Image (cartoon, rainbow, N blue to C red):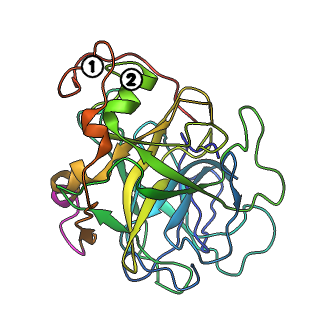
């Protein structure tokens, strides 16, 4: 699945307004998906499985993903930007669960760096609150100190490309793909030492074939803890899509709890401490040039998924 640069919130709710930034959103009690159990290598997501998924659109066209984090705010990637739409299973055709809202305020992280993709996170305020249903609900956010060990099972959703240069075909049904977390040390070694900072988290199948891609940017990566889904990452960038030994890179949500709370002062999103059990095998991973702790200052430009 190719997820990246424009904001289109697709949840089974959609408010469309030509010429305006619109948000399509899925909402309800944080992290619960009553109906749940094409991204590259993904499959169609059943309606209601990911009720926080948003499609960010401009002039009626999807360009980025996002996630509903409360009744009035959507979280996405800073590199995206313009209109939002909530939960919709497909971008084309009738959808009784779609709700759309205009975006009235966009807040980019003040330290976002477009060259290194560090701090690639943005908050979008909707023109009016959305009503939570079984198809529209907010996702829980990973709290500060959350731990996602190498191999943690994760899911990424979006309407991005199904392979590099190949758009999701009609009727553009929301795609879902299961990918494991790849530890930051290993991800740095694979993508180039210095590329991945502590503000990022990686995921992907090292054999290739499953990944986010262009159009998925800004969308959520989530993991389940008990009965609650927790967002660990925001689709940010990668070298190609679903290439072997090149895991996708996501903004690490847990690093931004304080910033998010400083920008949203009422009806704040729900934060959940996610803890992986056992020793993280990534802690002993090494390669030439990799420091004891990855440097967050020496980085190289990378390809962003739009």
Magenta segment, which residues? 261-267
- How far from the left and from the top, in percent, is residue 125? 37, 60
Residue receiving disc 2: 189
Looking at the image, residue 119 lies above or below residue 175: above
Q: Do the residues labelled 2 and 1 touch (CB within 8 Å)?
A: yes
Q: Quadrant of the C terminus?
A: top right
Q: Position of residue 304 (x, y in %)?
A: 52, 30
Spot occupied by residue 209 in the image (x, y as percentages of width and height): 67, 41
Front one among 205 and 248: 205
- Magenta span includes 101: no
Residue 175 vs 28, above or below: the answer is above
Secondary element at image label 2: helix
> Is residue 22 visible from the viewing direction of this image?
yes
Left or right: residue 45 compared with residue 285: right
Give the residue pinned by disc 1.
Answer: 290
Q: Which quadrant of the figure has residue 75? A: bottom left
Q: Which residue sits at x=68%, y=74%?
A: 46
């Amino acid at each position: 699945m190719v997820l990246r640069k424009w904001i289109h919130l697709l949840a089974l709710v959609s408010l469309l307004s030509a010429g305006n930034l619109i948000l399509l959103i899925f909402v309800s009690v944080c992290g619960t998906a009553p109906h749940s159990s094409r991204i590259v290598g993904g499959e169609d997501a059943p309606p209601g499985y990911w009720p926080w998924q948003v499609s960010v659109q401009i002039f009626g066209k999807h360009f980025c993903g996002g996630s509903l984090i409360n009744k009035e705010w959507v979280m996405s990637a800073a590199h995206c930007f313009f209109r939002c739409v909530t939960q919709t299973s497909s971008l084309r055709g009738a959808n009784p669960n779609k709700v759309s809202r205009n975006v009235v305020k966009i807040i980019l992280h003040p330290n976002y760096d477009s060259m290194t993709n560090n701090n690639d996170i943005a908050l979008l305020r909707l023109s009016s609150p959305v009503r939570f249903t079984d198809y529209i609900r907010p996702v829980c956010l990973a709290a500060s100190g959350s731990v996602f060990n190498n191999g943690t099972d994760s899911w990424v959703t979006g309407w991005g490309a199904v392979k590099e240069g190949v758009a999701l075909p009609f009727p553009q049904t929301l795609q879902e793909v299961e990918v494991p977390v790849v530890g930051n040390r290993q991800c740095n070694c694979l993508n180039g030492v210095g590329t991945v900072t502590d503000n990022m988290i990686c995921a992907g199948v090292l054999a290739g074939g499953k990944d986010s891609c262009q159009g998925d940017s800004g969308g959520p990566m989530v993991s389940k803890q008990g009965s609650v889904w927790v967002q660990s990452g925001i689709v940010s960038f990668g070298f190609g899509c679903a290439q072997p030994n090149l895991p996708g890179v996501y903004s690490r949500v847990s690093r931004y709890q304080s910033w998010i709370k400083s920008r949203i002062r009422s009806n704040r999103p729900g934060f959940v401490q996610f803890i992986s059990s056992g020793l993280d095998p990534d802690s002993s991973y090494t390669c030439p040039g990799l420091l004891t702790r990855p440097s967050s200052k020496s980085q190289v430009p990378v390809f962003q998924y739009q």
